[in-house]
Image: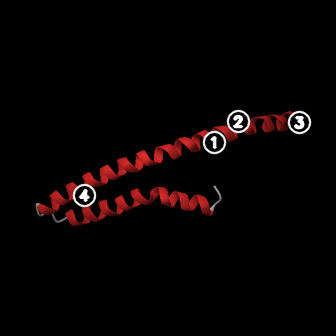
Amino acid sequence: MNKKLILAAVLASPSVAFAQSKVETGINQAIPILVGIGMALSVVGLIFAGIKYNTGDPAAKEQAKNVLIGSILILSASAIGGLLRSWFGG
């Protein structure tokens, strides 16, 4: 019974590696699209925060700060992911 299980694991490992490669390729192709969407949403958020600030809303400064921090995280997400991948050997 154990020999059959080992044989099945050995035969399945190339297909698992191939599937993982295809998933990784798909994620790598989606990253620029997601960063572009994030940049567009950041611009819209900053515009709304600017409009609120211009009207005198007291919470607008905090909202603008939060949108700016989110924008920085969105723009640096792919670089942070690459750095983590290089650190942990991915």
First in residue order: circle 2 vs circle 3: 3
Checking the image for residue 46, the label placed there is: 4
Q: Is residue 41 left or right of residue 79?
A: left
What residue lies at 21% left-to-right and 58% top-to-bottom? 49
Q: Amino acid at mark 1?
A: Gln
Rounded to the nearest whole Å, what is the CA distance between mark 4 and mark 2?
A: 46 Å
Find numbered disc 2 in the image and state the secondary structure of the residue it sits on. helix
Give the residue pinned by disc 1: 20
Q: Residues within 10 Å of mark 1 (few under 14, many from 20)?
A: few
What residue lies at 60% left-to-right and 61% top-to-bottom? 86
In which quarter of the view is residue 60 placed?
Answer: bottom left
Give the residue pinned by disc 3: 3
Q: Is residue 2 left or right of residue 40?
A: right
Find numbered disc 4 in the image and state the secondary structure of the residue it sits on. helix
Q: Residues within 10 Å of mark 4 (few under 14, many from 20)?
A: some
Rounded to the nearest whole Å, what is the CA distance between mark 2 and mark 3?
A: 19 Å
